Image (spheres, rainbow, N blue to C red):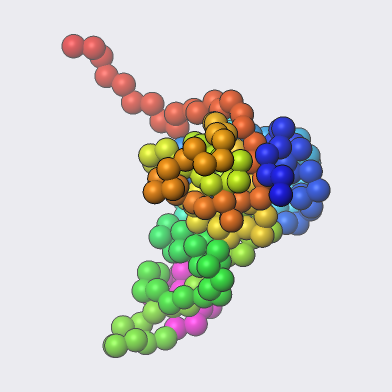
Amino acid sequence: MKKVYGSAAEALDGVLFDGMFIASGGFGLCGIPELLLNAIKEAGTKDLTFASNNAGIDDFGIGILLQTKQVRKMISSYVGENAEFMRQYLSGELELEFTPQGTLAERMRSGGCGIPGFYTKTGVGTVIAEGKEHKDFDGETYILEKGIFADLAIVKAWKADETGNLVFRKTARNFNPPAAMCGKICVVEVEEIVPTGSLDPDNIHLPGIYVHRIIQGDHEKRIEQRTTRPAA
């Protein structure tokens, strides 16, 4: 099976459709699939639902799709750093499903493992629990959270071989593995594609069975908040 494609647009060709559900890796601006997000913007695909820890910033990451009003709903744990995200939510233009960060990661992982739902104590007694099934185990109350099954997963990795085995770099690993697992189709952008067999099997973070298409590209790697101090 051919997995390596020449560009983000080529890798997404025939995959995108209006109203689709996309799981996106990354945390803030760390490890986000910036090339694939740009390609979605250029394609003009609209009425999108995104499951992502957050939406980047106003002019980078998912934020560029909020600017063009291509996103209908966000499933996220954090809305800070993005003024347009907050504006659209507060004005009723954007639907938002708040999900605790660990719950969001587990919902993605569960979807990738074929698990339709799980019980967690996180959110019990808060607005997160409203409308959800409650169940007691050993005297403790839990709520039912559903696994995420996305039409498409877009993620960013450091290295891939030609069969799709992935290696992530340090904290850029974040939400990328669970996001990759829960998509019916997974498209990955990487910094380097290496020959099959050159990656140490013990160092592979996500096996290629989850990956359908790969592109290699140059990445901007912005810093979300830069903190400096004067030299001594």
Residue 184 appears in the figure: yes
Most frequent secondary structure within the magenta stretch:
loop
What is the x, y in percent for residue 75? 56, 57
Q: Is residue 75 left or right of residue 11?
A: left
Vertical side of 3 occupied by 120: above or below: below
Task: Compare residues 206 and 172 and report the one nearer the observer.
Answer: 206
What is the x, y in percent for residue 122? 38, 69
Task: Compare residues 180 and 119 and report the one nearer the observer.
Answer: 180
Query: Which image quadrant is residue 228 in?
Result: top left
Query: Which image quadrant is residue 65 in?
Result: top right
Q: Is residue 14 magenta?
A: no
What is the x, y in percent for residue 113? 53, 67
Query: Which image quadrant is residue 192 in?
Result: top right
Residue 56 appears in the figure: no
Give the residues in magenta: 125-134
Q: What residue sits 62% from the left and 65% below the top?
A: 149
